[in-house]
Image (tube, rainbow, N blue to C red):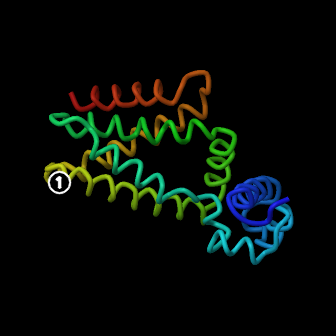
Amino acid sequence: MPRSGEDARRRLQQAALELYRERGFDRTTTAEIAARAGVTERTFFRHFPDKREVLFDGESALREVMTEAVAEAPEGLAPLDILRRVFATAGQRIEQNRSFTEPRFEVIAATPALRERDLAKHASLVEAVAQALRQRGVDARSADLATRAGWAVFDRAARDWIDDPGQSMSVHLDRAFEDLRGLIA
């Protein structure tokens, strides 16, 4: 079995998720995660700086996808319409990995240290998307407000998708954006 590269990274993530669900985040060590993944603890630290980050891998790739989606949106769209496209792109990514996404949400919800990290990661993504909107000419206040509202909609849609997997993430996202527009009207 390979001991490095993407395969090892995925095995570390899966092992961590399993152990966090079985024992809880606080009672799981990086050594235990590495052992379950079939690698050394040193290999764990080559891939992740700490045991929290194993659940947050991919943030930079998601940031890139989201900011590119802002940049590539057709001219003339309102900020919320741009964000609908951005969050649809992000939603496809989490939907493609449901077997990891759903238990990851559960572990984060049950662990204060992970909820804190999750909020920090979300704030960073919100700022990156707001910055991308500003680069398109949206004023700073509107870019910030739209992105924060858009993130709340995305979060609601993701929770709904976890609760109702019979509908696609896109359907839940459309519904949540419709709800937001109804509240604004």
Q: Indicate the position of residue 167 as horizontal and vertical percent values.
A: 55, 22
Look at the image and tell me in which quarter the N terminus lies.
bottom right
Q: Indicate the position of residue 51 as horizontal and vertical percent values.
A: 68, 69
Relative height, residue 95 to residue 110 (above, below)? above
What element does badge 1 sit on?
helix
Q: Residues within 10 Å of mark 1 (few under 14, many from 20)?
A: few
Q: As rendered, which of 184 and 72 lies closer to the eye?
A: 72
To which quarter of the image does residue 78 belong? Answer: top left
Q: Indicate the position of residue 132 as horizontal and vertical percent values.
A: 26, 53
Relative height, residue 23 to residue 73 (above, below)? below
**Total numbered labels placed on residues in the image:** 1
To which quarter of the image does residue 13 belong? Answer: bottom right
Relative height, residue 176 to residue 128 (above, below)? above
Q: Residue at left 39%, top 38%?
A: 153
Q: Indicate the position of residue 157 as horizontal and vertical percent values.
A: 47, 34
Q: Residue at left 15%, top 34%?
A: 76
* Amino acid type at image mark 1: Arg
Q: Residue at left 48%, top 38%?
A: 91
Q: Residue at left 54%, top 56%?
A: 58
Relative height, residue 156 to residue 48 (above, below)? above
Q: As rendered, which of 130 and 111 lies closer to the eye?
A: 130
In the rendered structure, the answer to whether residue 175 lies left or right of residue 165 reads: left
Can you name the residue that lies furthest to the bottom here?
42
Dot 1 corresponds to which residue? Answer: 141
In the rendered structure, the answer to whether residue 66 lies left or right of residue 105 reads: left
In the rendered structure, the answer to whether residue 89 lies left or right of residue 99 reads: left
Look at the image and tell me in which quarter the C terminus lies.
top left
In the rendered structure, the answer to whether residue 140 lies left or right of residue 26 reads: left
